[in-house]
Image: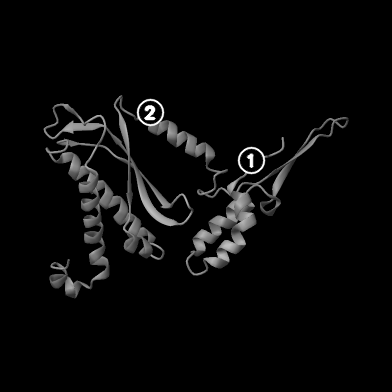
């Protein structure tokens, strides 16, 4: 069967060399290895095996090339992604859900080029604390909630734009653990308050990483 749809590997093969040259110095060795794996996945570059009909009159032959098995490869991880999605769907409650997105402030996002583990950790920690804090406030919901959060490191324009996508149930367990508290049907949290809270937590988490310990006393009064 002929393959007609465009794949990520096709884009990498056509535009990868120019992109790597334009972004030299901003792309890690691990990222380059991922691109190479996706480009070579299920091609002759990785070898393969041959299946041939034993009937001499038929002799039909099929060549199957090996997979790269890289966890970032869309061809290799398709089945795993579908299984993960099915498992998450099985966990859903019979309540409305909201899609919430938190984007890192531009100044912090730029640091993620060379400090991914630390900065992405701040993104997840600050966004989760923001939602939990707002949900626990009796003025907003007054409940404990669950969160499913997924990292995206680029935006729709395929440029560097670290942000977290959250799926949040429309309610939670009351703080005393006795009942379900449903949120308003049109909104989960005040947008302005959540943004201010999130950005404040981001800077608070980042400060110990960029200010020497000897300066901690003066740093506590920084604004």
Labelled disc at residue 131? none
The picture places residue 62, in percent across and down from the top left corner, at: 75, 38
Snapshot colouring: one colour
Question: Which residue in the structure is indicated by mark 2?
Answer: 90
71 relative position to 148: left or right: right
Q: Nearer the viewer, mark 2 or mark 1?
A: 1
Question: Which residue in the structure is indicated by mark 1?
Answer: 5
The picture places residue 94, in percent across and down from the top left corner, at: 31, 24
Question: Does residue 119 lie above or below 167 as drawn?
Answer: below
Which is more N-terminal, label 1 or label 2?
1
**40 or 20, which lies in front?**
20
**55 or 160, which lies in front?**
160
Q: What is the distance, in whole Å, between disc 2 and disc 1 at their CAs?
A: 31 Å
The picture places residue 143, in percent across and down from the top left corner, at: 17, 35
Q: Residue at x 55, y 66 (%)?
A: 22
The picture places residue 16, in percent across and down from the top left corner, at: 59, 59
């Amino acid at each position: 069967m002929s393959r007609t749809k465009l794949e990520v590997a096709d884009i990498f093969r056509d535009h990868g060399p120019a992109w790597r040259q334009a972004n030299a110095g901003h792309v890690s060795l691990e990222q380059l290895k991922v691109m190479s794996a996706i480009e070579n996945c299920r091609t002759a570059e990785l070898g393969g095996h041959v299946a041939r009909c034993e009937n001499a009159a038929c002799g039909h032959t099929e060549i199957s090339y090996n997979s790269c098995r890289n966890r970032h490869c869309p061809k290799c991880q398709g089945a795993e992604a579908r299984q993960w999605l099915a498992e998450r769907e099985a966990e859903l409650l019979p309540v409305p859900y909201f899609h919430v997105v938190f984007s890192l402030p531009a100044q912090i996002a730029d640091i993620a080029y060379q400090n991914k583990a630390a900065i992405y950790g701040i993104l997840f920690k600050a966004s989760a604390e923001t939602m939990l804090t707002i949900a626990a406030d009796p003025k907003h919901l007054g409940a404990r909630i669950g969160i499913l959060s997924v990292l995206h490191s680029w935006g729709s324009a395929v440029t560097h734009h670290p942000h977290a996508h959250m799926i949040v149930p429309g309610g939670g367990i009351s703080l005393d653990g006795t009942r379900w508290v449903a949120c308003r049907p049109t909104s989960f949290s005040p947008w302005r308050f959540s943004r201010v809270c999130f950005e404040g937590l981001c800077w608070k988490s980042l400060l110990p990483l960029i200010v020497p310990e000897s300066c901690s006393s003066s740093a506590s009064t920084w604004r």
